Image (cartoon, grey):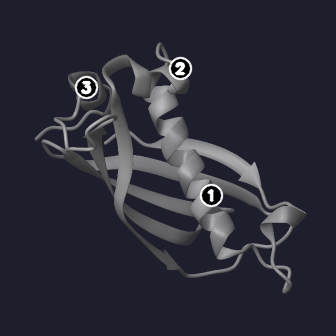
């Protein structure tokens, strides 16, 4: 399993009235992690061209988040992302948000691949399958 990592920090805009990082920020860091996972896995194709190349979009079918701790202003945030399973039309992605080696939140994501015009499911492109190291 190939793990992709990105780092960030908790900024004022990430916090709520209590001074803790908001749920929205957790979901934002997870989204950034998934985006950077694709960028690192397929570096030769810019993100703006991935959808245009084959007319295929990636959409989130479901997402779950289990938060165990809070993050605060200036905390260093690490998001790890990996593909757990690739099926014909969708894949399961695991993610965790960490601070100083402690898991703050864990995500389970199911992403599907659809045709940009018809919005119908399409087979996951072989380039994705190979780059992300998954099998059917």
Residue drawn 63% across the image and 53% down it: 78
Vertical order, 17 against 76 (above or below):
below
Question: Which residue matches tag 3?
Answer: 130
Give the Cα distance between marks 2 and 1: 20 Å
Question: Which residue matches tag 2?
Answer: 46
For marks 3 and 2, the one nearer the N-term is: 2
Question: Which residue matches tag 1?
Answer: 28
Circle 2 Cα neighbour tier, 10 Å, few/some/many (<14 / 14–19 / ≥20)? few
Considering every residue shown, the one lying at the far top of the view is 44
Rendered location of residue 58, percent (x, y): 37, 42
User: Tag 1's secondary structure?
Assistant: helix
Rendered location of residue 27, percent (x, y): 58, 63
Residue drawn 71% across the image and 75% down it: 22
Residue drawn 22% across the image and 48% down it: 90
Circle 3 Cα neighbour tier, 10 Å, few/some/many (<14 / 14–19 / ≥20)? few
Q: In which quarter of the image is the C terminus?
A: top left
Residue drawn 51% across the image and 29% down it: 39
Vertical order, 62 against 30 (above or below):
below
Give the Cα distance between marks 3 and 1: 26 Å
Q: Which of 118 and 63 is in front in this view?
A: 118
Give the Cα distance between marks 3 and 2: 17 Å
Single out the mark in the foreground, 3 or 1.
Answer: 1
């Amino acid at each position: 399993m190939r793990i992709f990592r990105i780092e960030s920090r908790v900024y004022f805009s990430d916090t709520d009235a209590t001074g803790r990082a908001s749920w929205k920020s957790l979901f934002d860091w997870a989204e950034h992690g998934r985006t950077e996972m694709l960028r690192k896995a397929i570096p030769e194709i810019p993100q703006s061209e991935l959808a245009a190349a084959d007319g295929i979009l990636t959409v989130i079918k479901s997402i779950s988040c289990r938060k165990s701790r809070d993050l605060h202003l200036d905390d260093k945030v690490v998001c790890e992302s990996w593909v757990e399973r690739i099926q014909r039309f969708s894949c399961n992605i695991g993610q965790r948000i960490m601070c100083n080696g402690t898991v703050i939140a864990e995500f389970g994501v199911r992403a599907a691949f659809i045709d940009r015009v018809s919005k119908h499911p399409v087979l996951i492109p072989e380039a994705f399958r190979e780059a992300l190291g998954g099998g059917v």
